[in-house]
């Protein structure tokens, strides 16, 4: 069984995916981490260049190295390596967040992430979360969810997320959230949108337990 969870930053996708993985024994696929892995490598590559831009040959270089994805079902931990270097601790920073959003517009990067996500889910009960899981990566998923929440609420959640390395104020985070929403929803390739047949859940006033009750009913049916 494949469950997809899409939605903008701070809507609760990762928290919900982690709970589904832990409580129902699903393999958790965080597609955002795959994009962030390429972003970490891309930022490192930019530091070695003088012009400050990544061209087609640079993208090809990024794709020549392997992104390894490991999910520990006992602890709910996701570990990401790039070219055999463990980089999980580097994934949740403001520069990587922005770079991942920009890189996700590249069709070659998106194709690589889509292919790897499908491989990870092969012959598994899996829950995949991101921005185009239900529309592009798993269009035939058994259940599709789209989470949303007010921009203010999402900014508050991101600012309070202790796993994110950020020194930004809540106002700066909200500005970043708005810019990310605009980039993700307006890109030509796989824009953020509600997948066909998806169940839309507004989490602004809902706790994770409230949402899990809805998921339990969905899986029961």
Image (cartoon, rainbow, N blue to C red):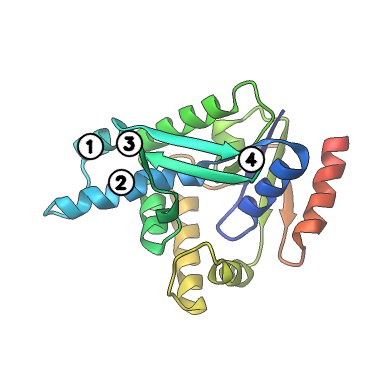
Q: Position of residue 175 (x, y in %)?
A: 46, 71
Q: Mark 4 and mark 1 in contact (Cβ < 8 Å)?
A: no
| In the foreground, 218 or 24 | 24
Q: Residues within 10 Å of mark 4 (few under 14, many from 20)?
A: many
Q: CA distance from mark 1 to mark 2?
A: 15 Å
Q: Which residue is mark 4?
A: 195
Residue pictured at 43% horizontal, 40% vertical: 189
Q: Nearer the viewer, mark 1 or mark 4?
A: 1
Q: Foreground: 181 or 12?
A: 12
Q: CA distance from mark 3 to mark 2?
A: 9 Å
Label disc, if present, on residue 83 of the rendered structure = 3
Q: With 166 as the anchor, is 72 left or right in this view?
A: right
Image spot of residue 101 (x, y percent): 41, 52
Which of disc 4 and disc 1 is earlier in sequence? Answer: 1
* For discs 4 and 2, the disc positioned in front in the rendered view: 2
Label 1, on which residue?
A: 56
Q: Residues within 10 Å of mark 2 (few under 14, many from 20)?
A: some
């Amino acid at each position: 069984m494949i469950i997809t969870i899409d939605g903008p930053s701070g809507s609760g996708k990762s928290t919900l995916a982690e709970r589904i993985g832990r409580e129902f024994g699903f393999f958790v696929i965080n597609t955002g981490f795959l994009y962030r892995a390429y972003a970490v490598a891309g930022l490192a590559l930019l530091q070695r260049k003088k012009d400050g831009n990544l061209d087609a040959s640079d993208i090809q270089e990024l794709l020549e190295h392997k992104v390894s994805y490991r999910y520990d079902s006992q602890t709910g931990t996701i570990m990401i390596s790039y070219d055999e270097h463990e980089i999980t601790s580097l994934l949740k920073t403001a520069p990587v967040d922005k770079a991942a959003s920009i890189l996700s517009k590249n069709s070659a990067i998106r194709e690589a992430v889509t292919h790897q996500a499908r491989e990870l889910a092969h012959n598994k009960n899996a829950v995949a979360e991101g921005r185009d899981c239900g529309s592009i990566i798993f269009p035939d998923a058994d259940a599709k969810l789209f989470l949303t929440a007010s921009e203010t609420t999402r900014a508050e959640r991101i600012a309070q997320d202790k796993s994110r390395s950020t020194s930004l104020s809540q106002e700066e985070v909200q500005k970043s959230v708005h810019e990310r929403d605009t980039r993700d929803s307006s890109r030509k390739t796989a824009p953020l949108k509600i997948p066909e047949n998806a169940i839309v859940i507004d989490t602004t006033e809902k706790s994770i337990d409230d949402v899990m009750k809805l998921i339990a009913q969905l899986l029961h049916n």
